[in-house]
Structure formats: C-alpha cells, structure tokens
Amino acid sequence: MEKDRKEGIKGMANPGRYGIERVAYWLMRITGLGLLFYFIGHIYETSSLLDGKAAWDSMLELTQTTEGHIFLTLVIGMCVFHTGNGIRLMIAQAGFGLGKPRRADYPYTPSSLNMKNKLCIYVSIGLAALAMMYGLGVMYDV
Amino acid sequence: MTKGGALPKGFERPSSSPSQEKYEKVKPSSKTTTLRISKFNPESDSTSTFSEFKVHYQRWTTVLDAILEVKSNYDHSIGVRYSCRQATCGSCGMIINGKPKLACFTKISELDSDSVTVEPMNNFPIIRDLAVGFERLIETHKRIKPYIIRDDSEVTSETKEFLQSPEDVEKYIQFAGCIKCGLCNSACPTMATDSSFVGPQALAQAYRYVADNRDKGKDERLKIIDEPHGIWRCHFAGSCSQVCPKGVDPAMGIQLLRGYLLGYRK
Amino acid sequence: MMSNIMRESHIMKIHYLTALVAVGFVIIHIMIRFTHGSFANSLEFESVIANYESIPYAIVLEAMLILISVHGFNGLRIILLELKQGNAYENAVTYGCLAAMIALIAYGSRTIIMATMGMVEA
C-alpha cells in the first residue's frame, strides 16, 4: 500500500455522508470544470462569426437543437450555482458568517457549519433551478 | 468480575472452546450486531480483508468496547490503538460505517445500522489492521511551529507570567482543545488527493497560536502556510469540523486564518 | 514555479477578484443579448455583428474573456495540483494552464477585434 494511503478520487464519491457543505464543494468543482469547458467551446463557436453568415448559421444549426437547449439550460444552472456558492465561499473564507470562537462544550456542534451557510447553499441550488426553468422558457419562447 | 469469582447475574463464564456458539452474554435487553473489522498486515497481505463477528451490545456499548470484546474472545491479533476510552487521548480514531469517528466516543446503538464496519482512517498509512501511522500529522503539526513565539520569556527573574484576560483566552481556547486524533485529516477531501497539503489539523493549530495574544510569530506562520499546498488548498468543505470530536471546528479556524492573508484581519 | 513568481495569496486574490468582476460583466452580456428581441432573434448573424460594432460592448466582451479565462484556468490549475504532486508535474500544470489561458485569450481577442473592425467575410 502506498505511503500516504490517500483516499483518492473515490473520496469524492458519496459527498452526502459529510453534509451539504461537502456536496457544495463537490458541485463547485463539477460546475467549475463544466463551465470552463463550455467557455472554451463558446469562444470557438463564436469565432465562426468571422467566416460569414453561412458559417455562423451552420454553427447555429449544431447548437440550436433540443440537445443544444438542454445543454445550455445545464450551463445556466451551473453558472448560477457556481456564482451563488462562490459568493458564499468568498464571504465565509474572509471569516464572516462563521460565528465566534468560544469554549467548546458537548455536543460540540461546529459553529462554522451553521444554518446561515447551509441556507446559502440551498438558496444557490434553488436559484440555479429557477434560472434553468427561466432559461428553458426563454429558449422555447414560453 | 474477580478472577475465579462469581459472575454478575445474567452472565455465563465462557467455555474453553473459543467458538461463538459457546459464548453468550445472557442479558435480556442486549441486542446483536455484526462487527466487520478490516484486517491488513503490510508484512504479509497485499490487500485488506474483513473479518466478521457477532457481538452483543447494550444501549451504552461503544464501538471500542465491541472491538475489545472481539479481541479478547475471538481474535487476539486485531491491531487497534486505544488508551483513555473517554475521547481525551485521540488514539482510537477509525472509520466507522464510512465516517471517521473515535471508537470510544461512538455508541453502537446510535449508529442506527444492522452492522458496524470499522476500517483504518483514510489518508494515513496502515501499521496493522486499525492502527495507522501518524508521522505525516506530526510532521505538518511541527511545521506550523506549535508553540508561543516571542523574544522574551516568562521564566526570568525580572519578568512575570504573561497575563491574559478571559476574553483573550476565549479567542483561541476552542482550538487548543485539539487532541490530534487525525479524524479531520481523514475526512478532508484535499488530504484525500494532495500528499503535500498541510491539513486541517495543522492549519487549525496555526490559527490557535496566531489568535493567542502572547504569540508574536504571526508573520512567520502566515509565511509558512501561504504556499501552493498550504491554506489555499482548503475549500471549506467543512468535513473536518463535521467529524471533530472535541468541537475544535478546524474549518472556522482556517477561514479566520485566511482573513489575515486576505487583509480582513490585522 | 508560479509560486516563485507570485505568492499563492496574490494568485488567490486575483482569482476572487476576477470572479466578482466577471459576474457583473456576464450579467451585462446576457442583458444586452436580450435587447434584441427573442432568444432566436438575438442569435441572428446581423444582430450579433451589430453588437460587435459597438466599442463599449466589445470592451465588455474582451474584459469577460480575460477575467473568465484567468479565473477558469487558475481553477483548473488548483484542481490538477491537488490530484498529483511533484516538482515536474506541478511546473507542467502551472505553465500549461498559463499557456492555455494565453492561447484562449489570444484566440477570443482575435474574434472580438476582427469583428469590431468589420473584418468579417460577407
């Protein structure tokens, strides 16, 4: 067995065993990577503008499909969650909203994993879901 | 129970045969669970296996009690570290049903499961079975200089002891409760992949000293942790605080410490 | 390594700053897209070209490109650094992400500058 016996990538599986904060960490990673790959594709996609209307319309044919709309809806959700949770993290990592250090006593509930933080995570997920629904509505002209 | 003396009512003396059927704790209120213990001897095994044992338990029986019962009566070779049995020494940290916990501080009745699976802590090398090596934790702990740094000393003829008000103590005492059990390092998702990460235990202790107004080594410590595998690889997953048995809340300490590096705290 | 050029705390301050500013610009970008009628209309070639010919909008696009590239590739660098360690690997990851970031910014800037200057094929 290796020296450190690291849990490895499979430590990422089943994030729910450690609470919503771990799920948020996991989602943050996934949405971040997803958005980066979307961004690279988007830069490439929009560069077809330089090749004229025909090239642009041909690119649109690829993306303005049902699959394309579903993918874009996911991107909207990823973007909203990543932004919302990112703002929560920035505030928490500056030391705000964590509670004050105090003498620990049974049952030793950690004050940093408080309802404020949990609520922000749930709000980010909720906002992402709402944004996805709104995006779908816009794309299908509802 | 005295050696050779009468047993309390409801208990039978085990027979000479070590088989499970011959040994019964006859208490009407006891329940039975399956205890699965991870077994691995690095000198002879290539991979870990699980040994299963049926154990009786009461409402108050801890996982450590069950492991020691198995060790006493079924498999004397089980390697397990324990000492105080009261969540003070930090020796008995292990993975219990998938989560890092202290075996002496975890009651079987509270696990709400038909079986109890115990494994050695993740992110630590195994010595044998449930006992793991703490070299990395000790090394990262030493790196952050876990002592008061200042030029003068309390121990001279002219000086008095360094005074602190109760408010001063309240700022760091929570983090001084760390018993170095390693559960936080085991739960941390960054420790799961990053061999060079300092770890939540060391970072929380760095904050303990930075927040102590007797200490003058803040800049020194901040310089140590301001590196690619230092404090910035913490992403506030909070798992360390979830599993800490002493309420140290390492996640809080780390974020407060980050405030110094980001300029929110002086 | 990058940490020899810039302290990790400075890199992370840039990471947070780019995130915050990029959010603002992305909101502006999406809102401007919506000033062109329906979603389908806003994607018409003429409508998109008309946007590029506005210098302030081109500046918004360029800013977004730089900010999101910096934030995204630094995030990728962080994830990759946590997966494996070692001097050679870490240097490769750091400089690789930097190179990819510069390449993407260059490619995107080419599109923005050429479209703004009207250098688009008929």
Image (spheres, coloured by chain):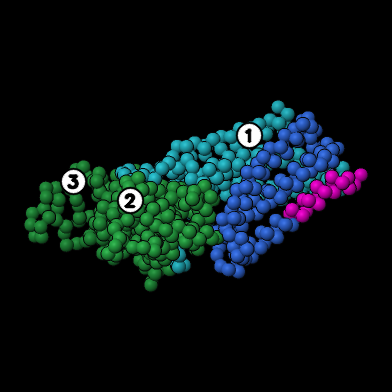
**Chain A display color:** cyan
As shown in the figure, which amino acid type bears the numbered disc 2?
Answer: Gln
In the rendering, at what x and y percent does residue B240 appear? 43, 51
Residue A59 versus residue B80 in the image, above or below: above
User: Cα distance, mark 2 to mark 1?
Assistant: 52 Å
User: Cα distance, mark 2 to mark 3?
Assistant: 53 Å
Task: Give the SS element for disc 3.
Answer: loop
Task: Give the SS element for disc 2.
Answer: loop
Say if the magenta span includes residue A73: no
**Chain C display color:** blue
**Disc 1 crowd, CA 10 A, few/some/many (<14, 14-19, 20+):** many
Mark 1 — residue? A131
Chain assignment, label 3: B
**Chain B display color:** green
Mark 3 — residue? B27
Which residue lies at the image location 70% right of the left edge and 56% below the top edge?
C101
Chain assignment, label 1: A
Left or right: B136 in relation to C15: left
